Amino acid sequence: MKIREIRAVGLRDATPEGGWSNELRPDDCVHTLVAVLTDEGVTGYGSVFTNDGLVKAALGVLEPLYAGENALEPERVSEKLHQHMFWLGRGGSITHAISGIDIALWDILGKATGQPVGRLLGGRYRERVRPYASILMDQPGPLTDHLLQVRSQGFRAIKMGWGPFGRVSTALDEAIVRAARDAIGPDTLLMVDAGGSDAYWGQGYKWALRTAHMLAEYDVYWFEEALAPDALQDYAKLREHSPVPIAGGEVLTRRQAFQPWLEAGAFDIVQPDVTKVGGISEERRIGWLAQEKGVRFIPHGWNTALGLAADLQLASAFAHTDLVEYLTGSPFIDEIKAGGWALDAEGYLPIPAGPGLGIEVDLEAVARYARGERLLT
C-alpha cells in the first residue's frame, strides 16, 4: 500500500483563546488537519499544531521523500522524513508537519490490519481513561461559574491555566486557587498551569517555589510550566524542592530534545504533544524514555479531536498514563469527530476500540471550519 497524496486544511473561525499575551483570534489558524491517501483507497487522518500555510509548505518540501512510500510502515517512513530534515527545519514546523503524517500513517496501519493503534503499539492496558478538562484561568468569580459548568458536564479532573496567574500578584494567584478548590470540592483533581511558555514570561525559580508551596495547601495535583521553557537547571532544582509534582515539556519536539530534561530530573510528569513532537512514533519513544527515568507520561492535548484520539490510543498502551487532556469548549475537539465524545458516569472517556485511531472524521464539519476547503474531494 503506497502513499499517493497528502492533503492539508487549516481550521479557523472557532479557534479558542489560548491565554497568550498575543491572544489568538477566532479566525487564526493554529491547528491543521492532514489526510494521507493511498493507492488502495485507505485514508488516514492526522493533526498538526501549526498554521496551515506552514504545513502546506512543509508538505511541498517533504513530498519527494514520502511520495510512493509504504503507508504501512509509519515509524520507518517518519524517521526517513526526520533524517532528511536536519538542514530544513528540524524541530520546527517541518517536525510538526511530520507529526500529522505519522499519526495518519498509524491510522492507516490500524485500518489495514483491523486493529486499534494502541494494540499495534504493544497492547491495551486500559479500555477507558480519565480526561481532565483544560480551561483558562479568570478572576475568582467568573472562574467559579466556569468550574461549576465543567463539573456539571461530568469532569472529575480539571486543569486551569494562564490568564492572570503569575502576572498580577501573589494574592490574586492564591485567591484564584482557593476559589477553584472551593468550587470543585476535595474529590476532583485540580492542576495549575502557569503558562511559562508565554512570550516574555517574567517569573523565575523563587516565585515558582513559593507558588508551589501555596499550591500544596490546596492539594493541587501538579504544577505545570512554572518556568520559561529553556530554564532546564531551574526546572530540575524546582522539581527537587517542590512539594507538588512538576509538569512540562509541551514545547519540546523529538525525543532528542526531551532526553536532557529527563536525565536532569526536570519533570515529575512529562507532557509531549503528539501533534508537535513527531507523531505517535516519536511520542511512544519519549514515553519509553520517561518510564526508564520513573517519570509519568501524560500527553499534552490542547489541539483537535484527532490529537485527542491519538492521545487515547497512546494512553491505552502505557501502564501509568491514566489521564489525557481535554480542551473544553472547542468545536475542533467536539465537532470534527462524528458523534462527538461522551464521558461515562464516572467521568471517564472510553478509548476507541475500532481500527486505527478508532474514530470517524466528520468531513462536513472539517469543511465548515476550513472555510469550504475539503480534505477529501
Image (cartoon, helix red, strand yellow):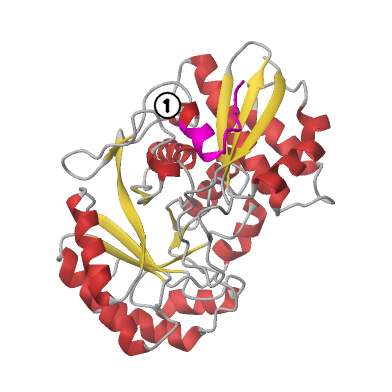
153 horizontally vs 92: left or right: left
Q: In this view, does 336 lie above or below 177?
A: above
**Neighbour tally class for label 1: few under 14, some 14-19, many 20 plus, Cα within 10 Å:** many
Query: Over which residues does the magenta segment extend?
Result: 365-377
Please name the residue shown 24% across and 51% down the image.
Answer: 155
**Quadrant in the picture for the C terminus:** top right
User: What is the secondary structure assignment of the residue under circle 1?
Assistant: loop
Q: Which amino acid does label 1 sit on?
A: Gly
Q: Is residue 364 above or below residue 327?
A: above
Please name the residue shown 35% across and 65% down the image.
Answer: 160
269 horizontally vs 181: left or right: right
**Is 238 in front, or is 253?**
253
**Is 34 in front, or is 325?**
34
Please name the residue shown 41% across and 44% down the image.
Answer: 331
Q: Is 372 one of the magenta-colored residues?
A: yes
Q: Main secondary structure of the magenta part?
A: loop
Q: In this view, does 51 lie above or below 251?
A: above
Residue 44: where, in percent of width, then height?
57, 25
**Quadrant in the picture for the N terminus:** top right
1 horizontally vs 349: left or right: right
Instruction: Answer with the quarter of the image where residue 314 lies.
Output: top left
Instruction: Answer with the quarter of the image where residue 346 lies.
Output: top left
Residue 77: where, in percent of width, then height?
71, 31
Q: Kindly identify which residue carries mark 1.
A: 358
281 horizontally vs 364: left or right: right
Please name the residue shown 32% across and 53% down the image.
Answer: 132
Q: Is 340 one of the magenta-colored residues?
A: no
Residue 338: where, in percent of width, then height?
39, 28
Residue 256: where, in percent of width, then height?
67, 55
Can residue 314 be seen from the camera position used here?
Answer: yes
Can residue 219 be seen from the camera position used here?
Answer: no
Q: Residue furthest top?
A: 40
